Image (cartoon, coloured by chain):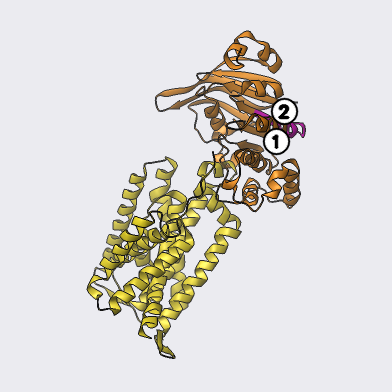
Chain colours: A orange, B yellow
Amino acid sequence: MGVMLSVKNLEVYYGSIHAIKGISFEVEEGEIVTLIGANGAGKTTTLHSISGLVKPKSGEITFCGNDLRSTDAHKIIQLGLAQVPEGRRIFAKMTVQENLEMGAYIRKDSNIQEDYERVFQRLPRLKERRRQLAGTLSGGEQQMLAIGRALMCNPKMLLLDEPSMGLSPLLVNEIFHIIRDVNESGVTVLLVEQNAKKALEIASRAYVLETGAIAMQGDADELSNDEKVRKAYLGG
Amino acid sequence: MDFLSQIINGLGIGSIYALVALGYSMVYGIVQLINFAHGDIIMVGAYVTYVVLVVAGAPLWVAILASILFCTFAGVLIERVAYRRLLNMNAPRISLLITAIGVSIFLENLSQLLFTSSGKSMPNLFPNQLLGLGEVQISSISLINISTSVILMVLLQILVNKTKIGKAMRATSEDADAAKLMGINTNTTIAFTFGIGSALAAVGAVLYCSAYPMITPYMGGMLGLKAFVAAVLGGIGSIPGAMLGGYLIGIAESLTKAAGGSQITDAVVFGILIIILLFKPAGLLGKNVQEKV
């Protein structure tokens, strides 16, 4: 059990807008850590900095001892860090099967077939629809596909950006159940969520992001009992 | 059966438009850039064929191969030098478009400098015979053009739909950032697309030279523009669309000429473009899969 992902003094600007103001946090191996906060707090920007889609101005990002800031975006997945992006970003004009193939793009070994089966076992609804264009799936199925796609590279760690967005409460429960299940199979999880209640339920630790800075941090249980967190994020 | 002969004639010329249109369409599909320098790649391909075949005296197959390889390299080089930085900085599309026009003028002037602006005449590349099938007269060149374009389109469809790099091309064209998250090197994928498009243009150049054996530094202009029209007509971004558009334009031209309208063929071609787009703005086979949000 060591620190898997560490972010130190991260600063990100969009032009003259100071989006992330020196945040630091860590994720240890095996944990589910959640980053909660309102719209525009900087959650997605933080994730995009980790995955190389946004170039930070300063700060350190290390994953398993590798400096991610000097790693090209397309090479980060090779280190074992996969992302389920906000809004799912599945390839709508490709089939479910092809989307999963893209998830396994970096793999050169021959066990991919077994991994399809594993993903289909975990997400049986995808199996029925494997020949269907991904754009024709329902929102919940698309989210499952995005998760399945990220799992196809056998990641050590999964970054999830708002997996509950736009889903019915029933589906949200299902997605969170899957996330917990994935974590129990040995994948470390960093979960970014607006749905703080759900996120705090499955996370071991949490960071609260407010306008680009970390306002609070601690055990998920403690934070869900905290008066300020309850008022601001849990609806009293 | 003069009508049928004209149709086949049109398909022969349309095959050339189709091959060039594929390059426009694929590049547009992946980076939303109208690569106006693409037409000039035909000219580059024609001159390479000429130099290797006539000046160096090599056999025809060597000249064709050299032309394909050189154009592939040129396409990749143009992407690397002129477009990549703009693409990676997410520059406005208008800047890319202006750059493409710049590259086009650069290529035309460069070839003028190297070969002067007076045309060079190409020897006969393929046997040109009239084959009679009953009452239908078909030129052997039309047959060569049509079969080449059909074979290449089938190969291209297999490449795009079945191979790993083809799937990476489709993923990149849909969502480049998501493709990066999958570990796809989008820069390489884009360069590959430019290379394939330019290789097809080189084949188009060889076929064009066998039908119209006069090459000039500006030959890519109108030909490129018509191929671009073919791509838009068929639905830009769609491979079968580019082929369909190319064939339609070839047939329209051929029939207009046969009807005695040689002077107005271009007006007819662009008139068809305007009318079809009025009714099908996305082109004949252009489609949008709506993504559920």
Identify the amino acid type marked 1: Lys
Q: How far is the residue under mark 2 from the one under mark 1?
A: 9 Å
- Location of residue B232 with respect to A106 vertically, above or below: below
Q: Residue at x 45, y 62 (%)?
A: B241
Left or right for A206, reference B207: right
Q: Specify whether disc 2 shares its chain with disc 1.
A: yes
Within-10-Å neighbours for mark 1: few <14, some 14–19, many 20+: many
A189, A222: nearer the viewer = A222
Q: Which residue is mark 1?
A: A156
Q: Secondary structure at mark 1?
A: loop
Instruction: Give whichever of discs 2 and 1 has the lower sequence position.
Output: 2
- State yes or no: residue A187 in magenta: yes
Residue B60 position, x and y percent, is 44, 79
Instruction: Give me the chain letter of mark 1.
Output: A
- Location of residue A53 with respect to B283 vertically, above or below: above
Instruction: Give me the chain letter of mark 2.
Output: A
- State yes or no: residue A78 in magenta: no
Q: Are marks 2 and 1 in contact (CB under 8 Å)?
A: yes
Q: Quadrant of the N terminus of chain B?
A: bottom left
Within-10-Å neighbours for mark 2: few <14, some 14–19, many 20+: some
Q: Residue at x 41, y 70 (%)?
A: B247
Residue B293 position, x and y percent, is 54, 38
Q: Which mark is residue A21?
A: none
Q: Which mark is residue A29?
A: 2
Q: Secondary structure at mark 2?
A: loop
The magenta region covers A179-190
A199, A207: nearer the viewer = A199
Q: Residue at x 61, y 33 (%)?
A: A167
B79, A209: nearer the viewer = A209
Residue B237 position, x and y percent, is 45, 55
Q: Is residue B229 visible?
A: yes
Identify the amino acid type marked 2: Glu
